[in-house]
């Protein structure tokens, strides 16, 4: 399914959270065409939220063939889509694992939009040599994954929370974790550990930031058909449909819109009494 051609199951709902109009959200790791970050950014934009998009500034030669064929240009392309949806956008190349880079993002967001209301920590380390047995896992690979998945979320959250507290208007932080944080999948030690730690970090932040009316939750996506699945070579082959039906009780893989709706809900007034939660959005597969 093309991410920009929704099916009936993922049809755009229009503006269903009008209270979000005019707010500012930072969405990290939002540059890939077939990604959760892009879907979150666009759904928030449909609600009238101005979006700060961060990405790593990938070399176009590393883009998947699908993106090259359509002339995709990472966060610049997503920024154009955000503006087409009726909101403003600020694309920034940034390293979430670098404190100075994070501070630069916060300063630019505040300068452009006057403050930060929402942070979506979606950036994730690229799949690579970390997918190895623990006894063969290089320390450098372990550190690389945790630097983005955990350190990046900590640095972004700390900086955003500081800005939210100083402004005095509350806010919402959503950390994109994974159902892998609740599973023990071989050859995924660094990834699984980083996501399990992210869940714990979210709960601690929720308790600490509650007096400032800042809500913090973790959203745990299940099997979502993104570019990451293609990198793992899981989304191809004759056995794909059979695998999905055996793994997901509802019988279908997600397309990212489901995650975007949950994030939007949590950041809206409808989610004003929800904080410190690890919420699975996975078609029922977590405990299956």
Image (spheres, helix red, strand yellow):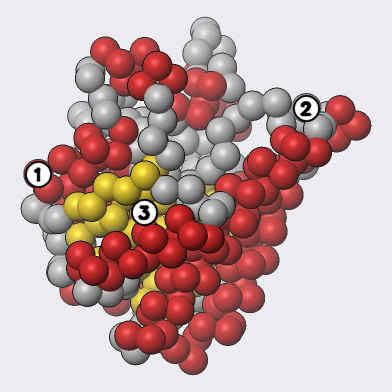
* Residue 169 left/right relative to 6: right
- Mark 2 or mark 1: whose residue is earlier in sequence: 1
Viewer-proximal residue among 239 and 125: 125
SS class of the residue under badge 3?
Answer: strand
Q: Mark 1 = which residue?
A: 84
Image quarter where the C terminus lies is: top right
Separation of residues labelled 3 and 1 (CA atoms): 17 Å
Q: Residue at x 50, y 67 (%)?
A: 157
The mark tally for this picture is 3
- SS at circle 1: helix
Q: Which of marks 2 and 3 is nearer the N terminus?
A: 3
Locate residue 188: give its quadrant: top right
Q: Mark 2 points at which residue?
A: 132
The answer to whether mark 3 and mark 1 are in CB contact below 8 A is no
Q: Are there few (<14), some (14-19), or many (20+) residues within 10 Å of tag 3?
A: many
Residue positioned most to the right: 135
State the residue in front, 182 or 187: 187
In the image shown, does 94 or 51 lie closer to the viewer? 94
**How would you rate the neighbour count of disc 1 (Cα within 10 Å): few for under 14, some for 14-19, many for 20 or more?**
few
Residue 59 vs 30, above or below: the answer is above
Looking at the figure, which quarter contains the N terminus? top left
Where residue 226 sits, quadrant-wise, is: top left
In screen coordinates, is 187 left or right of 271? right
- Residue 99 percent across, percent down from the top left: 53, 60
Residue placed under numbered mark 3 in the picture = 27
Q: Is mark 2 on a helix, strand or loop?
A: loop
């Amino acid at each position: 399914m093309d991410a920009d051609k929704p099916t009936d199951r993922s049809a755009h709902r229009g503006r269903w959270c009008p209270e979000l109009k005019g707010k500012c959200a930072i969405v990290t790791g939002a540059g890939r065409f077939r990604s959760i970050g892009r879907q979150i950014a666009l759904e928030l934009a449909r609600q009238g939220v101005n979006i700060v998009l961060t990405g790593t500034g990938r070399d176009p030669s590393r883009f998947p063939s699908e993106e090259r064929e359509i002339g995709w240009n990472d966060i610049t392309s997503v920024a154009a889509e955000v503006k087409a949806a009726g909101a403003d956008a600020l694309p920034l190349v940034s390293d979430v694992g670098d404190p100075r880079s994070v501070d630069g993002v916060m300063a630019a967001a505040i300068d452009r939009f006057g403050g930060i209301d929402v942070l979506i920590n979606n950036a994730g380390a690229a799949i690579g040599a970390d997918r190895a047995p623990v006894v063969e896992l290089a320390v450098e690979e372990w550190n690389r994954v945790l630097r983005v998945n955990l350190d990046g979320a900590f640095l972004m959250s700390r900086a955003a929370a500081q800005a939210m507290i100083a402004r005095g208007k509350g806010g919402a932080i959503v950390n994109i974790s994974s159902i892998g944080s609740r599973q023990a999948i071989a050859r995924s030690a660094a990834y699984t550990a980083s996501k399990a730690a992210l869940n714990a970090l979210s709960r601690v932040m929720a308790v600490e930031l509650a007096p400032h009316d800042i809500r913090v939750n973790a959203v745990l996506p299940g099997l979502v058909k993104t570019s990451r699945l293609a990198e793992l070579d899981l989304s191809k082959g004759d056995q794909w449909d059979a695998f999905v039906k055996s793994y997901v009780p509802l019988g279908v893989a997600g397309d990212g819109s489901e995650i975007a709706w949950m994030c939007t809900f949590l950041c809206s007034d409808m989610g004003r009494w929800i904080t410190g939660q690890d919420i699975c959005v996975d078609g029922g597969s977590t405990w299956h």
